[in-house]
Image (tube, rainbow, N blue to C red):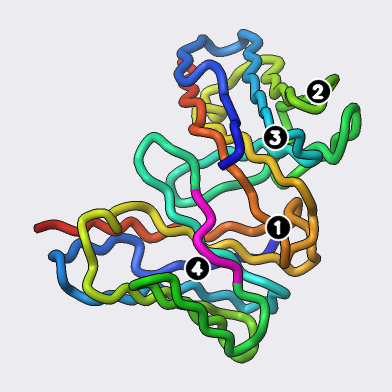
Amino acid sequence: TQLLEQSPQFLSIQEGENLTVYCNSSSVFSSLQWYRQEPGEGPVLLVTVVTGGEVKKLKRLTFQFGDARKDSSLHITAAQTGDTGLYLCAGDDTGTASKLTFGTGTRLQVTL
Amino acid sequence: DAGITQSPRHKVTETGTPVTLRCHQTENHRYMYWYRQDPGHGLRLIHYSYGVKDTDKGEVSDGYSVSRSKTEDFLLTLESATSSQTSVYFCATASSQGSTNEKLFFGSGTQLSVL
């Protein structure tokens, strides 16, 4: 089973600050997804990255896939309280969702 | 968003009793999945289905069985619940299985406590 390590595990910041969350593995993935999960709800897909070095932007969120396709990062600019939640990365190396490996998550709290 | 309903949302049961969790979807998605979420472990796949009556084991399938008699329903059964099965269970669906097009839609989860 492939392992996906996320760091930091917990992050508490004030509104307006910037932050970066990391997702690392020793394995190569054909694609990597980022999800956000709010309390009492299921994860919601934010983005899928598939090409080494790829950068995708979703408003204030910037996602990058490592050149070697073993790691990824999520950068949030000017965090807002609505960004609060659990951020999960999930890697796939077979092209099938049944083989998705989820990271343990980064819990982000943004306060006023 | 896909209409995925999990029932019950919360359940407390005793060790040794059978428990069935239900996932109902209204999107006619072919693929359905059951995950469990535990602190320090992320989401782990229990079982999945790639069509009616077609199911397969995931990473943590021991102690669990599933059934899918209709496209819209996917049942997860704990034949004899144990305390180690206390967890939050999520159902997910997908219309396709190619990773670049894949989007998993998750239900809101079932909090199961086995005492």
Q: Is residue A77 left or right of residue A59?
A: left
What residue is disc 3 on? B27
**Over which residues does the magenta segment extend?**
A44-48
Q: CA distance from mark 3 to mark 1?
A: 15 Å
- Determine the secondary structure under disc 3: loop
Residue furthest right as drawn? B53
Q: Nearer the viewer, mark 3 or mark 1?
A: 3
**Amino acid marked by disc 3:** Glu
Residue A35 picture location, percent across and down: 49, 57
Residue A5 is marked as 4
Q: For the residues carrying marks 1 and 2, which lies nearer the camera in this image?
A: 1
Q: Position of residue A34 (x, y in %)?
A: 52, 63
Q: Are marks 3 and 1 in contact (CB under 8 Å)?
A: no
Residue matched to label 2? B67
Chain containing the residue with disc 3: B
| A67 on left or right of A11 | right
Horizontal and vertical percent position of residue B55: 85, 35
Q: Is residue A24 above or below residue B89?
A: below
| Nearer-N-terminus badge (3/1) | 3
Picture quadrant where residue B48 is located? top right
Quarter in which the C terminus of chain A is drawn: bottom left
Specify the subunit that label 1 lies on.
B
Marks 2/3: CA–CA distance: 18 Å
Instruction: Give the residue number, with chain letter if any, for mark 1.
Output: B102
Say whether marks 3 and 4 touch (CB < 8 Å).
no
